[in-house]
Amino acid sequence: MNWYQLDVENVERKLHVAANRGLNEKQVEKRRKQYGANELEAQRKTSKWLIFLKQFQDFMVLVLLAATLVAGLLGEYIDAIAIMIIVLVNGCIGYFQEQKAEKSLEKLKELSAPMANVLRNQKWSKIPSKQVVVGDVVRVASGDRIPADIRIVQSSSLETEESALTGESLPVMKHATAIRKDKLDAQDQVNMGFMGTLVTRGSGVGIVVGTGMDTVMGQIASLMVNTKKVMTPLERKLSELGKILIIVALFLTALVVVLGVMQGHPVYSMFLAGVSLAVAAIPEGLPAIVTVALSLGVQRMIRKKAIVRKLSAVETLGCASVICSDKTGTMTENQMTVKELYLNGKQLYVTGDGYDIRGDFFLTKAKLDKNFPNLETMLLYGMLCNQASIIVKKGKHYIDGDPTDGALLVVARKMGLTVSTAESYRIIKELPFDSDRKRMSVVIEDSNQRRFLITKGAPDVLLPRSMYHMDEDGRQLLREENKQQIEQAISDMAEKALRTLAIAVKPLSKHDDLESAVLEKELTFIGLYGMIDPPRKEVKSAIEECRNAGIKTVMITGDHVKTAKAIADNLQVLPENGRVLEGQQLNEMSTDELEEMIDDTYVFARVTPEHKLRIVHAFQERGHVVAMTGDGVNDAPAIKASNIGISMGLSGTDVTKEASSLILMDDNFATIKSAIQEGRNIYENIRKFIRYLLASNVGEILVMLFAMLLSLPLPLVPVQILWVNLVTDGLPAMALGLDKAEGDVMKKRPRSLSEGVFSRGLGYKIISRGILIGIVTLLAFMLTYQDNPNNLIYAQTIAFTTLVMAQLIHVFDCRSEHSIFSRNPFENMYLVLAVISSMLLLLIVIYWQPLQPIFHTTALSVRDWMFVSVFSALPTVLFGFSKK
Ligand code: ATP
């Protein structure tokens, strides 16, 4: 059976559903059980065992395990078992971290999963596409990805792009009529919509006939999305850096071993010490920890309503120097209310707020009623040329659909016009709104079978298409002076920050060609709507914060230049000498001219989505890192081209979401600011733990190296080195990844994309602190050993304790780019807890007798602790005050 061959009624009958009601809950439940979830079979996941084993695949760890085995065979059971346990615990921690990162990324995927608009129990609602079942009635509109295979039952200029299936990138027109042919290929089944293909224009309704693997897309397994993990720039940089560090650490370790052997230490014990040192000092896990830090940051961002789609965006966010933001809905509430009308050459005022349907019409002070000429007609036309509907929940009115359309319904209701008023009109054709056309039209037939076209849209688009205008005496020719008058009215409204919309009509005869290119021409201008869309409260301060952080905010809007300017002034986007450019001006400008002007430009008005791409490129040419927002299907190229593409969680289309690297769950500009702040913070935290880990590693290697150079015994035994690597380098480093931002994180200029990991003095800090940690540990060891030449274990315990304590004090220094005293150490309780638990573990290892032989330790006295405290505090005391 081919669905495309069946009439809509047959499809409805076969699937037991009515297209105007949808399924009921019972049916949905039954079908969900019968057919399963609407998803393509997930790719096979890596098994947990493999992830666990991966933790031990590192070359040096393998060498260590081999060396331990040899130690075991030689009778050094205790050392061998201790080392084994430490390696195992280390592996477990790695495993759990990786699992956690994986889970948070899974959650992200779920959050940004596509949604479908379905009709169930006569109610439209948005549900995750995964939950769609056969028989569901779904509505799709421009920008959507079709959630399942559907038989189209209603189409208004519906066009889809099916290149993912057919390779054909030209859009296909879709209709609802059955096709009586046999064996048609997917591309010829023009009354079907296929899962995963894109709606490029118009809208439509369809009944789901296939879900999950039972779709055309499901059959083409090879087309399944490739979800291979891509490294972020920082992960890549660090893994390259890691390679260099491995060589340096291996070289130094080899030096330690060779020197040790030359000094007469036994080859076997030097080898084990060397390998342990290599395992501890080689930062092979750095990229993995960065992934963990990034994914933890991503979770924090989710709490702030920003969903990161690409991990690399977290890094790039911190570099953003320009945010190009849509005005409507992102900077403003997108809650339109008609405040003024312009009709018969007169300015009318409408009272009432938001979508509340109570309100009155006034001409100066006189209240108006239905009898005011053309008023009812204008309001009725606004209702007919409309794709939204009013819904009532708990006595309050809301809008389902475009808020601009919604405002027209509400203002019509204020004059008593309801859905039943519109019922005597039949819609024959709909030309939907899009930001390029900036207008929408419908062809209507009234009860006397008279046809006419209603067009509404941007006034400067409709006016040139108008030949006549309406006044109290009926239709008149539109003369130059009328035009000027209307333009003045538009300008007056726009200056008050009102969004302007014109409405026009054109009588048609039955024989008029509805496909004709001149259909929307020779219109009769009726009037103007002026609607207010209040700025979001939190946006003004967010813009200010961005400015302080060296980030420029640019407003991009399809609205009238004066409306845009008024709102930009209100939000303080536009500085005194700031430039406002219009789409028309952009058209006339060369790329070079645009680049020259773009640095002073803060508002782009009356632009189409195509202009956005030029704007992104121009800013990038000027060396900026650009964040660009978008919601419509045509915004996708600009979003893709920008450094950080941002899409809207509420109003955005699937296409823009897919092209973007960040989704704003609440469509709010202020969320971009929070995301940037978080992005900067995550990067700083990564720097913090790199600083801590590497300085610790430098310290560890140097103690051993200096000792060998000075012909001393080994200051640390292998298990101690491994313990330091596990405990001291583990917990506190992770806690640094969770640190709060430093107070000035949004007061600095954005970081450059090309900035190296060790820039801004980080390399110097690592080396200088590392050397000092090495020196104080060695000094403590030397002095103790000198006084107690017969008690090496005692001297080693002192060295071990000094090294651990020096690192635990140093970790607080790593929290700040300034001095250690610039931050309250108790601010990061994770860190405090990590340090306390490391210290407790240290005490256990030193004082608990059963562990003493394993860790080669002995109990320390109070005097010893005072001695250790002085030495371990030295590196931080010496450098803690300085910024360098
Ligand atoms: P942005 O989100 O970029 O600020 P915008 O909402 O300001 O976009 P568009 O949606 O492209 O810009 O709208 C541009 C103009 O088109 C509006 O100023 C208005 O005159 C007109 N317009 C907006 N919505 C509709 C609609 N639903 N029907 C007809 N015309 C519309």
Image (spheres, rainbow, N blue to C red):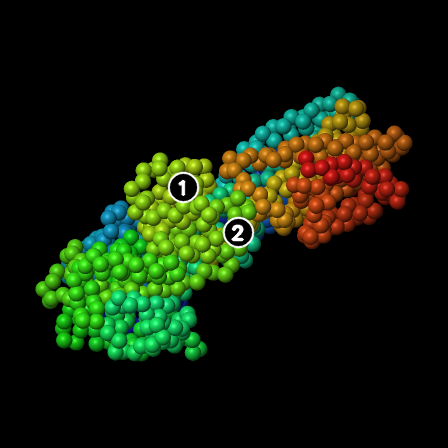
Q: Is residue 843 left or right of residue 571?
A: right
Q: Secondary structure at mark 1?
A: helix
Name the residue carrying label 1: 598
Which residue corresponds to the image point at 52% horizontal and 47% vertical from the top-left? Answer: 547
Image-quadrant location for residue 569: bottom left
Q: Are marks 1 and 2 in contact (CB under 8 Å)?
A: no
Amino acid beneath label 2:
Glu
Name the residue carrying label 2: 544
x and y percentages locating residue 672 in the rendered image: 49, 52
Does the image show residue 371? Answer: yes
Q: Is residue 517 left or right of residue 369?
A: left
Image-quadrant location for residue 790: top right
Q: Secondary structure at mark 2?
A: helix
Most foreground residue, 89 or 504: 504
Which residue corresponds to the image point at 45% horizontal and 50% vertical from the top-left? Answer: 574
N-terminal of the pair, mark 1 or mark 2, is 2
Quadrant (top left/top right/bottom left/bottom right) for the C terminus:
top right
Which residue corresponds to the image point at 26% horizontal and 55% vertical from the top-left? Answer: 461
x and y percentages locating residue 696 in the rendered image: 69, 37
x and y percentages locating residue 407 in the rendered image: 35, 68
**Relative to 188, residue 852 above or below:** above
x and y percentages locating residue 703 in the rendered image: 75, 31
Amino acid beneath label 1:
Ile
